[in-house]
Image (tube, rainbow, N blue to C red):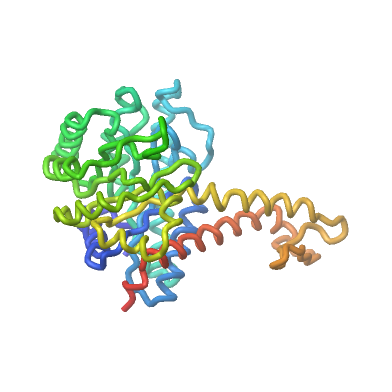
Amino acid sequence: MPLIRDYDETRNLYETCAKANLVMARIGYSDQDQIHAIVRGAARFAQDHSIPCLPIGIFATIGHYIMQQLPRYLKADHVLPSKGGDPVEYRRRLLRNAKLATGFMEVLTDPADSDFGMVHVTHHYDHGHHTLPGGEVSQNELLREPEFLQHFSSVMFDDTHSPFPENVENSLAYKKFLDAGGHKKVLEGCLEEVGAAGLGTQGTAFTDPNHIEEYLEKTGFELVVPNIGTESIHAKPVGVQWDILEELTRRGVGHRLIVHGFSSIRTLATEEQQRLGKLSVVGMNAWSYIPHSVGPRLLERAALIREQHDEAKGYPVGFSSGNEPIYQPSDDANIFFGPVLDQVRDLKVDLIADGVYEILKNLGYARLAK
């Protein structure tokens, strides 16, 4: 099955994970190479473990005030409408980028493709802000544009900058808007800004289990993001509030929690990462490890290629495990242009794919094997 955007089929993928006490890995992207790498890593894991249907989420933020991913898909020179950007040009860019991204996902995960067809993808609109810090209604999102929303499987309606009662009211109104227009989506809410809780002025309060129950009951949302100490700044772990997860599990909220903050989660022992799936968590967002971990390695490789350029031998086509340059003088343009056009790109794809593979391994995806 290709990219899944149907409401029922999206729910089914989450239910597949819930039945296995498995946390669905949801990996963010800001360009095509990252999508390719996510699917490639997931497909390799599925093939290695004989998994006929491997569910994975791929997400992008749109107008998030800290990091906008989809507007950067082709080029990172956009200006948000709230900061003086042209809203018409901004919308045109987003629609084009959404079409390009979803088209790429659909082709890549075509069921007939023996390389990637076993990967079943949901496309998630992350951190769709109703309000910005200070309570101003965001001009940067396309939350109410059906032409745009058709490219997504699920939406995070983020009203964390409103008081809890208004958050509930606005979330319910948004669900009614979608349902009334026949644009039903798997919806995800958030009660507090998922910031680095406990880190001084950067932090926000941890989630109150009472609010989680009340929010899910009153809004009818399928999912909610709790602030349990997984999010951090500069990839430093804060400390998972296991007592909150245990309490929510005792209350029987079901597998309806999505956690953010993979940079922190990846520091946990494997058994603790898998324990999340037993404690009502059904999904986990990961992206920041790409700029934190992969980005510096790409910069190092680019610098190394230039440093090891030889007038007679050209640029190195690769490096040994000891970082010794490997040269292959040739008249073949695929070889002598490779280092300057392809080598860093291919390394990027390989490193992200390896990271995805490790995430799936640590979360316990092998249990989906036949």
Quarter of the picture containing the C terminus is: bottom left
Query: Which quadrant of the figure has residue 61?
Result: top left
Quarter of the picture containing the N terminus is: bottom left
Question: In the image, is 208 to the left or to the right of 328?
Answer: left
Q: Nearer the viewer, residue 349 or 366?
A: 366
Q: Residue at x 72, y 67 (%)?
A: 320
Residue 146 vertical placement versus 8 (above, below): above
Residue 227: percent from left, percent from top = 31, 43
Residue 179 vertical placement versus 81 (above, below): below
Residue 128: percent from left, percent from top = 32, 37
* Residue situated furthest left in the rendering: 218
Residue 139: percent from left, percent from top = 34, 26
Q: Nearer the viewer, residue 218 or 308?
A: 218
* Residue situated furthest right in the rendering: 312
Question: In the image, is 291 to the left or to the right of 87?
Answer: right
Q: Residue at x 20, y 32 (%)?
A: 164
Residue 279: percent from left, percent from top = 25, 58
Q: Residue at x 35, y 74 (%)?
A: 51
Query: Which quadrant of the figure has residue 323?
Result: bottom right
Question: In the image, is 116 to the left or to the right of 128?
Answer: right
**Number of on-image labels:** 0
Query: Which quadrant of the figure has residue 137?
Result: top left
